[in-house]
Amino acid sequence: MAALGPESGPALTTGTVAGGESLPQTGTLSGTAALPAAGKVTGTFWRRFTLRRPLAALIIQRLGLSVGLLFAVSLMIFGGVEALPGDFATTYLGQSATPQAVENIRKDLGLDRPLTERYVTWLSGAVKGDFGKSWASKNSVSEQIGKRLGNSLFLAFFAAIVSVPLAVALGMLAVQYRNRLPDKIINVVSLAAISLPEFFVGYLLILFFAVQLGVATFPATVYDSMGFGERLSAIALPVATLVLVVLAHMMRMTRAAILNVMSSAYVETAELKGLGAFRIIAKHAAPNAVAPVINVIALNLAYLVVGVVVVEVVFVYPGMGQYMVDAVTVRDMPVVQACGLIFAAFYIFLNMAADILAILANPRLRHPR
Amino acid sequence: MSDYKNYLANQVMLGKMNRREFMGRTLAAGVALSSAGTLFATSASAQEPKKGGHLKLGLEGGSATDTLDPAKALSQVLFCVGRNWGDMLVESDPLTGAAVPALAESWEPSPDAAVWTFKIRKGVQFHDGKELTIDDVVKTLQRHTDEKSESGALGVMKSIKTIEDKGGDLVLTLTEGNADLPLLLTDYHLIIQPGGGYENPNAAIGTGPYKLTSFEAGVRATFEKNPNDWNPNRGYVDSVEIINMNDATARIAALSSGQVHYINRVDPKTVSLLKRAPTVEILSTSGRGHYVFIMHCNTAPFDNNDLRMALKYAMDRENMVQTILGGYGKVGNDFPINSTYALFPEGIEQRAYDPDKAAFHYKKSGHSGPVLLRTSDVAFPGAVDAAVLYQESAKKAGIEIEVKREPGDGYWSNVWNVQPFSTSYWGGRPTQDQMYSTAYLSTADWNDTRFLRPDFDKLLLEARSELDETKRKEMYRSMAMMVRDEGGLILPMFNDFVNASTKQVKGYVHDIGNDMSNGYVATRVWLDA
């Protein structure tokens, strides 16, 4: 678990996401989906709305919270970067800094203005969707981030479409052959993969497939003029690394959730009815185990977008993570802020989506009463 | 050395150097006369560079914050990128470090070396087809020196008082005489741009051997050959690709799998492993960077020269080079200059590890108790190990050193240049004058040994405007001896630049000026099929 970065991500402060390791009963999934005790619709408009349209109310509430959260994140990032020793002018110029050059840059960027004034200026721009220009390269932040974010999503998308079905299928397979050889093999291999740090997995793959066998493309650098096929072959190794890293978490959650359901009475009934084992798992057990699995998948998807900077560096892949790290190194505030907000937004969105899907998957939450 | 011969031989071949000049320079480089003679006869056929091919470099040191404006270029990648698309007025000779004409054809100083006249090369075209004019040159230098400048070369340029166009020649007037001025103009920020780059500093339009075709900061840069290059003696490959690889293992993997032809910054600890790869060649070049242990000459107990001497003799330099640099370096002699600098004072006796002498001076100093040394791995790679090694070698001389490991964050602001005894790193400077002015002049901000010697300062200023090289060299010898025998600098080693290439890459010139063949790697090598 320690290898999974998102566990400490800022967006977890939402706190309302259940899921996780404790296999919650579906009924306790969300605190905000307050189940009405009585059918009487009274009280304020919001309360009546909540009772009549619990799902819409939940989404509206979450969206409101998200905006507040993003605001808090921007404040924290701004404060954090300000607290780091040295400002942009001195770190950017480094050893060759002369007092005059430092002064020129400070004046040029308005670093001589007070902290609060700078934050408010930035915020008023950001609200209008204008993230400003990078201090270091003087290019538009939105434009640069667009490209990097595209790369990150491209990698995350392919890692997800391989790993999610694979994890769920392997999880079901493990249940089917519970405590027998296939289950044990799946467990040991996936646990071994998750126990190795991702850079190490990456190096091993590079060593075998790129250096010794020479079948894979390395480095995985993608650029504008590259064709789609070339891109796919370039990202093969990083995708394989990411799949190995996230697979075990999702697979084991699937296995545990289904096993949990398998011990319930209606599954026993199905067994007594003489249904085949796989049909029981796929048709009867899986839908009821879906909520915790969706939560784990959401966490891992978020990780695939925001937590893969190490994999990006190892494979020389131009994603968002590397972009943000570069910006932090020289205290390039507009870039750091924009990256931080996008990462936080992804986290919040995926968690919210997981909640909503879990409710949709559960009839008791879908039709309160 | 043989690569330098190749370089010179190519100059001969292309008619850029006559026989006499060639012989003079190979002799200066210590090439035996007979071999130089044969070389001159056979080089044209044997050393002919192959043209064509696509050269890929995997380089550390780029970032998403990089910008093409040469004034703001700081990273290793931008350094190399700039060398591909642009030219300075002056270049430095790869082996002797002397000034060599580039966009300036020739130059002439006034007798006091305070006014310099440069003749600008005619018939040179920028990549956009415009002809290079004196106006472009004047404006470029102005952009790097005016009061709004954010240029990294501002420190180098501040001694220039006026920049003028006098009848088509560039005339620079300095605030004081400086015999090294042409070398200052080799600074990699000072790329001549059309209109001085005022209009579009990031355009990357220059006069260099390669045109920039695409650039993604921190990711990749691609180039194609400039067909109208004024200098036929460079730019052999058709196209160049620089890939930004900040991970050391990724670089090594890319090189050994043949995906790139050349990588920089090979870790000395893994060189011996990389060497085993049959397709790889290690390219190690002597550099000017040095790892140092610095004492403040004005702070007790280091204000006692006998204690400083004892600590100098207690340093096992050979062991340091072997252990900390894996053999990829040279021992230092307690002054910050090595043979890669022009006018290096030869024949100064090498200081060696001598516990007896150390013990003698230690006793004479009357000091007792442990000496506190502060260190951190940010000072230089392996600095903590080096401190512990030093502690051991000093112990044999009866000197007790207490090693204190400081946090890396804030080391440069809280320990270096603040505490009286610490470890540090110095990159080289283009000239001896600059090295001494930066760190050994009494008034220098970075005088990190608190070397306060009016006689040294006077000598430094005199040497700066001295045009007679013999006299100047003698002055540098006296200065070196002062720092070596009375200064607060313990300099156990100069580190080499360790790069690597595939065996396909030919013609690599080991340039003492800076890393990666002084940034010119892509313009100097060719690919052997």
Image (tube, coloured by chain):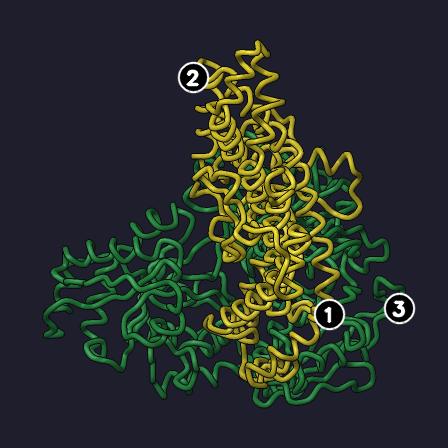
Chain colours: A yellow, B green
Q: Is residue A227 rendered to the left or right of residue A145?
A: right
Q: Is residue B290 rendered to the left or right of residue A12?
A: left
The residue that appears at 26% across and 55% down in the rendered structure is B316
In the rendering, at what x and y percent does residue B453 appear? 34, 85
Q: Give a yes or no on whether discs 2 and 1 share a subunit.
A: yes
Q: Chain of mark 1?
A: A
Q: Chain of mark 3?
A: B
The residue that appears at 50% across and 40% down in the rendered structure is A199
**Which residue is more in the foreground, A116 or B417?**
A116
Q: Estimate how packed mark 1 is, as few (under 14), some (14 to 19) or many (20 or more) residues with alpha carbons within 10 Å.
A: some
Q: Residue furthest right?
A: B129
The residue that appears at 50% across and 52% down in the rendered structure is B497
- Give the amino acid type for the residue marked by disc 3 in the picture: Lys
**Which residue is more in the foreground, B233 or A30?**
A30
In the rendering, at what x and y percent does residue A233 appear? 70, 33
Q: Chain of mark 2?
A: A
The residue that appears at 14% across and 63% down in the rendered structure is B399
Q: Secondary structure at mark 2?
A: loop
Q: Give a yes or no on whether discs 3 and 1 share a subunit.
A: no
- The tag on residue A130 is 1
Q: Residue furthest top?
A: A274
Q: Secondary structure at mark 3?
A: loop
- The tag on residue B130 is 3
- The tag on residue A179 is 2
- Give the amino acid type for the residue marked by disc 1 in the picture: Asp
